[in-house]
Amino acid sequence: MAYSMDMTTPNTSASDIRTDSWVEWLAPSIMRPYLRLARVDRPIGTWLLLLPCWWSVALATGGWPDFTLMAQFAIGAFVMRGAGCTINDIVDRNFDAKVARTVLRPIANGDITVRQALLFLMLQLSIGMMVVSQFNPYAMLLAISSLGLVVLYPFAKRFTYWPQLVLGLTFNWGALVGWAAVRGELGWPAVALYVGGVFWTLGYDTIYAHQDKEDDVLIGVKSSALALGDKTQAGLFIFYGATVLSFGLSGYLIDAQIYFYAGLAICAAHLIRQAVTVDISNPPACLAMFKSNRNFGIGILAVIIFNALVL
């Protein structure tokens, strides 16, 4: 249980604020709360936001993806993941102060005021705008249109048991933008890639949400972990099955070689392992499994590039 016996004071030993990261011993003290707010010491979120962008760039290029474009997406993903975290923590500051895993986050514990967080958000969004302004007009407008989802996500847990779906729609938007940045338009392969990414996120973030389910019940917010409960394993098979089928369709739409499907099958084994071995009663194991999805995403990127090079 994440709360103390009187059910009012969270147990800070479960906090997700790391005390052993480089932020604590290398960054100037005045910067530390902002770096924690942007989660720079926990890069998994940036990876999960970035990889769909890189998939799509590689898929649309049909060869070695342009290094400059890949770097622009890397910068954009880093900044916009931080901006998303800032928005999330502003909106959830009262909830975060009551949950063991989030009680020490900078806004919840008072290290950063809401006004300071908003100014920091403006800085992050300005840098993000500088990045997307380098894209063609179609890709730039498509990227900017994702901001509605970014703002919606923190509120989703208040009205639906499927905020993970909103996160999936948000985090995988880069699968559309990446294609548009290369081609100047959308294409069905990118749409299939996007749909697969949404289901992928539904899977991995449901696993992640099982860390907070007891606290979520106490404070009255919703998640797919609560919606599925003991049926989570079956849900993962459905979500990850849809992921693989959608990625396979994306390959079909670009006339992928057999190597693509063989590589996809290898990557699918990673997802199957998650669905088979998930332990929803073990928060540390859920976190480790959630983080392992970076490896799946890198694998998909390798499959797309390899397929392009052997065409």
Image: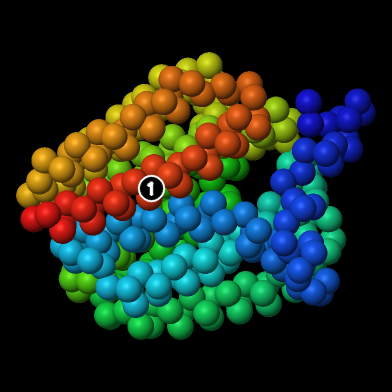
Q: Secondary structure at mark 1?
A: helix
Residue, x 25% and y 39% (percent of image)?
264
Q: From the top left corner, tell me how far across and down residue 2 is, in percent.
A: 79, 31
Is 105 placed left or right of 79 in the picture? Answer: right
Q: Label 1: which residue?
A: 297
Q: From the top left corner, tell me how far across and down residue 214 is, in percent.
A: 70, 28
Name the colour scheme.
rainbow
Q: In the displayed orientation, state which residue is furthest to the right.
A: 6
**Hey, which quadrant is residue 15 in on the image?**
top right
Residue, x 26% and y 67% (percent of image)?
65
Q: From the top left corner, tell me how far across and down residue 167 is, in percent.
A: 47, 48
**Hey, which quadrant is residue 50 in on the image?**
bottom left
Is 153 placed left or right of 1 in the picture? Answer: left
Residue 292 against residue 175 in the figure, above or below: above
Residue 91 against residue 286 in the figure, above or below: below
Is 143 placed left or right of 114 in the picture? Answer: left
| Amino acid type at image mark 1 | Gly
Q: Is residue 82 visible?
A: yes
Tag 1: Cα neighbours inside 10 Å, few (<14), some, or many (≥20)? many
Q: Quadrant of the N terminus?
A: top right
Residue, x 29% and y 51% (percent of image)?
302
Q: From the top left corner, tell me how far across and down residue 130 is, in percent.
A: 46, 83
